[in-house]
Structures are given as structure tokens and as C-alpha cells.
Amino acid sequence: MKIAIIGTGFAGRTLAAGMAERGHEVVMGTRDVAQTSVRTESDRMGNIGFAPWALGQPTVRLTTFAEAAVGVDVVVNATAGHASIAALTEVGAINLAGKVLWDLANPLDFAHGFPPALFVKDTDSLAEQIQCAFPDTKVVKALNTMIGDLFVNPKIVAEGDHSVFVSGDDPDAKSVVTDLLTSVGWTDIIDLGALGSARATEMLVQIRLRMMSVLGTPIFNFKIAR
Ligand SMILES: NC(=O)c1ccc[n+]([C@@H]2O[C@H](COP(=O)([O-])OP(=O)(O)OC[C@H]3O[C@@H](n4cnc5c(N)ncnc54)[C@H](OP(=O)(O)O)[C@@H]3O)[C@@H](O)[C@H]2O)c1
């Protein structure tokens, strides 16, 4: 598959590397290619900068937001939640039309420090706002409920015996995302139903961030025990 990952932070990079490793053709989108390609500074979680990471990913191409989604099958939104609509607007409604848009962003608002608030919740979600802004795309929410380290390596926690949620209005688009999740080792993939269920998974970030403080590590996940 041809996959465009919009966003060059830890989340986008982790998914990009995992998908490239499994033989997909991966392109990443950023605001300023020249600036991002020489970025060496680590992020606030201590993850290495884009430039040293890219040295180990020769098959992943970096381009502009506007060019990234041209001719791909799946587009992933891995941008900061507050910037997602603006970034996707640069990607272009025409380039998103008819495509699966896999959204893994969270609507975090750091205006009052840590833990962040959510700038949308309860009666709406970032996923639904994206769907509303780009009605011709098929938005699927998944992977926003865990740290990026687990995205393509679920087995690093409890041998993968834990859960990932999928929300979306289009069954075929959800199947595409579910198949990609299966291909990287996910087994407990829970279809939560329509995209409105992303309100719930986006709000899970609040307990996740508090668990991170309690456990002293972000390497854990939710397991729905039946
Ligand atoms: N980090 C994780 O483990 C994790 C796990 C689950 C979900 N998420 C979610 O995934 C998303 C990405 O997280 P992240 O940690 O990888 O990095 P991030 O710092 O939240 O976002 C980085 C990306 O957002 C873009 N961006 C930031 N401000 C922008 C603006 N004003 N206009 C356009 N684009 C802008 C950046 O573009 P440039 O490339 O141009 O700099 C970059 O690609 C977030 O929504 C986060 O909540 C993250």
C-alpha cells in the first residue's frame, strides 16, 4: 500500500517505520522539508530528532503536506491536535477525497501546563471535527489511546494481550485500518462503532497521562477484560 503520514513527530515516525518495515511505500508530510530534514533536537519525551531518525529509514520519503497525499491509498493524521485541521487543509481536500484518513491525534491543550486539557470532548471530538471539515474522506480513529512505542510493537507489553479501539462511519475504511493493525501484531481490535465513539477514546488520554505519572513509564496499555 502507499501510505502518507502527515506529521513528523514520534507518533508519525513510529508508524512510518513500522509500515515501511512491512513493505508499504511510506511518504511523510511536514511543513518545511528543508527545516525538518536537519532537525536534530529531541522532543519533550526525549525521542531523537527527525534527522538522526531518518538516517535509519532510507525508504521513507519526506515531502510537503501538500504533496504527501497525492496518489496514496491511506493518509494518517499524526499532527498535534490543535494543528490537525490546518495541516490537513494544507494536504488538500482534493488529495484526501475518497481516501481512508487514519486519525491518531489527540485534542490536547497545553495552555495551562501538564496534564493538558482537551480542547474538544464529551459532545464532539477531534475526529468528528476532521470528518466535518473533510466530508469526502473516510475518517477512522485508532491508536490514539497508547504511547507510540506500542503502535507497531504491541508485544512489548504483556506479550500483546491488550486492546486497541477503532471508530469510524465507513466499514470498508475501518477494515483497511483493522487489517493494517493486524499486520503489525494487534489481536484484540475492538470496533467501537461510529466515529462519534472517538469522543470516548480521545478522553482516555486523561487517564493514560495520569497512569504514566503513577507507573513512571508510558509503556503500558488498556486491556478490556471480558
Ligand atoms: N507521541 C505519542 O506517543 C502519541 C501517541 C498517541 C497519539 N499521539 C498523538 O499523535 C499526534 C502527534 O504526536 P507527536 O508526539 O508525534 O508530535 P506532536 O509534537 O504532537 O506533533 C508533531 C507534528 O505536528 C505538526 N504541527 C505542529 N504544529 C503545527 C502547526 N501549527 N501547523 C501545522 N502542523 C503543525 C508538526 O509539523 P512539522 O512536521 O512541520 O513540524 C509535526 O509534524 C498528536 O496529536 C498526539 O496527541 C501521540
Image: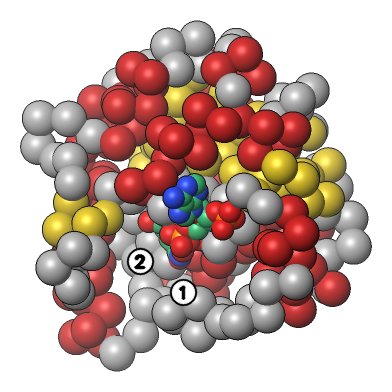
- Give the vertical position of 98 relative to 81 (above or below): above
* Mark with earlier residue (1, 2): 1
Measured as percent of width and height from the top left, residue 19 is found at: 72, 50
- Give the vertical position of 102 relative to 150 (above or below): above
Name which quarter of the figure residue 158 lies in: bottom left
Measured as percent of width and height from the top left, residue 176 is found at: 60, 28
Measured as percent of width and height from the top left, residue 213 is found at: 22, 84
- Give the vertical position of 151 relative to 182 (above or below): below
Can the viewer see residue 4?
no
Determine the residue positioned at 17% across, 40% down.
120
Left/right placement of residue 153 relative to residue 84 reads right
Determine the residue positioned at 50% across, 64% down.
148
Name which quarter of the figure residue 224 lies in: bottom left
Measured as percent of width and height from the top left, residue 16 is found at: 69, 54
Q: Which residue is denoted by mark 1 in the rendering?
A: 157
Farthest residue, direction right: 58
Name which quarter of the figure residue 145 lies in: bottom left
- Going by the numbered disc 2, the residue's amino acid type is Asn
Residue at disc 2, secondary structure: loop
- The crowd level at tag 2 (other Cα within 10 Å; few <14, some 14-19, many 20+) is many
Residue at disc 1, secondary structure: loop
Dots 1 and 2: beta carbons under 8 Å? yes
- Which label belongs to residue 221? 2
